[in-house]
Image (cartoon, rainbow, N blue to C red):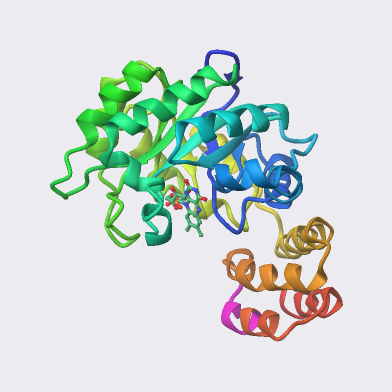
Amino acid sequence: MIKLNTINLETKLIQGPLAGVSARPFRELVWQYSKPAYTCTEMISCKTILHDRDFVNQRFINKSPLEKVLCVQLSASDPRELGEAVKIVTDMGADIIDLNCGCPKKKIRSKHTGSKLLSDPHMLYQLIKAMKDNTHVPISIKIRVDGTSNDNFNHDIVSVIKDAGADLLVVHGRHWQENYETPCHYEQIAFFANELEIPVIGNGDVASLETLKNMLATGCAGTMIGRAGVGQPWLINQLLAELDEACIVKPAIKKIAAIFLTHIERLCSLLQSETFAILHARKLAKYYARDLINRHAFCAAVNQSHTFNELQQVCGNYFE
Ligand SMILES: Cc1cc2nc3c(=O)[nH]c(=O)nc-3n(C[C@H](O)[C@H](O)[C@H](O)COP(=O)(O)O)c2cc1C
């Protein structure tokens, strides 16, 4: 169990934020098939929250009754705006609020948000303080690491987190300029776990018992799973069972197709558009088809589908 100031997290595995994926239908499936410590929304800009709070609630937050602990992830560059946004998302039901300090995208960095904040410790301090001053819920910070760069921000981040009083730190073990081919810097995750008294969550490339054990060996209190959770909402339960030297039976291939279709059907109602939901289905297909022998043909057929009915037929043809 991981203890935060106002809540106890029941397990040590978290489903992380994934832009374009982590809407309510995805998170709901994770809770249906696993017992995560918490799930996360995708990153939401404070400005969007301040200017269109109803849209944000409907499209990005929309907490499900199944979600015991939901973390809302924000991007920000202005402490005053962030404080206001934090009040709003607290009212919308956020159980944890996270500040994104890891996004490497040019568009995000150019607004002085995401990973850009790692090189501005003074601003980061002010942002964390603004969060703490405007909510009672735990505050988490999601960062990337120095990696092999000359940035040397790891030490500064430790000081800022201690001084500003964040409650949880999530560390993706890569520098913002490193892509997914670069192996994670486990020793840098271990550095944060060692230096800080608050729980540190390790993140990067965890997809199996072996990779999970490597991550936990850093001394982190828990692990955040990103990509591997897509298309396998049972993964967290599988890994928790395997850690206890037990095992769970993975859903049969037909059941996986049914979960995929449920995901898309729920996206149809969330987005109120079959067309948009089918566009999502095209992106999600490869994740649900991990175990299919004719995976490429299946994805190609999903790409040719335009309606939910067609998608059902394609699933029927391939998931036998
Ligand atoms: C498609 C995609 C979208 C992502 N969106 C976000 C996001 O909105 N916020 C965030 O903090 N990280 C985001 N990430 C990063 C992941 O949360 C995670 O840190 C990273 O993928 C490493 O973990 P993994 O190897 O378990 O996937 C995204 C990653 C991917 C691949």
Give the residue drawn at x 52%, y 18%: 133
Can residue 198 be seen here? Answer: yes
Question: Residue 171: percent from the left, percent from the top?
Answer: 37, 38
In the image, residue 261 lies at what x, y percent? 78, 64
Which residue is depicted at the point 32% across and 17% down? 163
Q: Position of residue 95 (x, y in %)?
A: 64, 26
Q: Which residues are magenta?
A: 292-298
Q: Is residue 179 above or below residue 140?
A: below
158 lies left or right of 83: left
Q: Is residue 235 visible?
A: no
Please give left or right for residue 213 compared with residue 73 in the image.
Answer: left
* Nearer the observer, 213 or 107: 107
297 in magenta = yes
Tally the numbered discs: 0
Q: At x 23% / y 34%, what residue is drawn?
A: 154
Q: Which image quadrant for residue 67?
A: top right
Residue 139 vs 67, above or below: the answer is: above
Is 65 left or right of 287, judged from the image as shown?
right
Q: In the image, is residue 110 above or below residue 215?
A: below
60 falls in the magenta region: no
Residue found at the far top of this picture: 5
Whole-percent x and y of residue 92? Answer: 72, 32
Which image quarter is the C terminus in? bottom right
Residue closest to the eye, 199 or 127: 127
Residue at image position (50%, 20%) is: 132
Quadrant in the rendering for residue 278: bottom right
256 on left or right of 217: right
